[in-house]
Image (cartoon, rainbow, N blue to C red):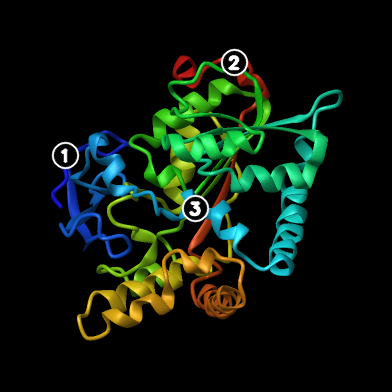
Amino acid sequence: MTIEVVDVTCDLCSKDDFERFATGTDYEYQTSLEQFHFVRCSSCGHVYLNPRPAESALEAIYPPTYYSYVQRENRAQSSGAISRMRERYHGAQLRKAFGDLMVAGRPLRILDVGCGDGRFLDTMRAAFRDGVETYGLDFDEKAVATAAAAGHQTQAATIEQVEYPDEHFDVIYISHVIEHLASPREFLRASHRLLRAGGIVHVETPNLDCLEARTARRTYWGGYHFPRHWHLFTPETMERLGRDCGFDVGTSTFATSPVFLNWTCHHILWNHRATRPLAEIFSVTGIYKNNLYALALIIGFAVIERLLRVCSGGRGSNMITRLTKPASAASTHPEQAT
């Protein structure tokens, strides 16, 4: 299938001078057999897909079977014990991450951008019960409807399109979505307006500066996710972007992410005709299911990923950055302050 593509400039510095960085195809869903290219900006070092799919191609490159659209279905078919174990673990992590942002007298307001079918919002509600208001955005109308049916306040829109009140949210959560956006810069500017002073944007995204990415740099690294990832960050480029958009930027931390290693193995096997039938051993969506096989993959790849982090100065493939709206910016938009 041929999809429409567009040439773009660097979103961090707007320059149009770059060098080829990596090349690959849609190893995961085969929505297109075309080759796509990541380039590195010669001015600021940011890595981005160029040319990339036009926005008219979004429906094609995100098929109905895309992993974030079927998570609720996967959970419904899964082992109850394993599901409950995962929920308890993630609930404890969320209370630790966001409990300090609770405001007296009202629930915590959290917006999940790229909410899919509402998996994360379900977990937030289970973790905080009546102490949270859950909002979600996604461009897939079916996924948004599924999340809404579960009781979340959702819209099929981008953050630039919605009309929430200024300074409405305590947390804007964007997990493995910022790399999919046409302009992370415009996203963060819109987020700045919607956050209260002291509120945060919780950004989770692939880290390009890790041993795993360097080892599989040419084409196979799971973090490339051709052609759906349009931007790839390091802690340094994420810090620059956050500060440019008016945020205080915390030190990036690194969480274990077995998924990218699973996808890397899938890509290597799928790209060779003789081994292609074996690629489903490392199924793109199977690792998200709550069954014993998926649990074994997660544990095995988590151990390997931890070892790679030791050999990479502690930098893993999954980067978390906390961007805080400073108190002095309560009524000032970043474009007004510069």
Residue depicted at 40% across the width and 36% down the height: 184
Disc 1 and disc 3: Cα gap in Å? 31 Å
Element marked by disc 2: loop
Vertical position of residue 273 compared to residue 231: above or below: below
Residue 92, can we see it? yes
Q: Quadrant of residue 149?
A: top right
Q: Amino acid at mark 2?
A: Asp
| Nearest to N terminus: mark 1 or mark 2 | 1
Q: Amino acid at mark 3?
A: Val
Element marked by disc 3: loop
Query: Could you say which disc has been placed on residue 7 in the image?
Result: 1
| Nearest to N terminus: mark 3 or mark 2 | 3
Q: Position of residue 89 (x, y in %)?
A: 74, 61
Q: Residue furthest front?
A: 77
Q: Quadrant of residue 185?
A: top left
Q: Amino acid at mark 1?
A: Asp
Residue depicted at 34% across the width and 49% down the height: 63
Q: Position of residue 72 (x, y in %)?
A: 57, 52
Horizontally, is 337 left or right of 327 in the view? left
Element marked by disc 1: loop
Q: Which residue is mark 3?
A: 70
Nearest the eye: 170 or 269 = 269
Residue 211, can we see it? no
Nearest the eye: 222 or 316 = 222
Query: Could you say which disc has been placed on residue 299 in the image?
Result: none
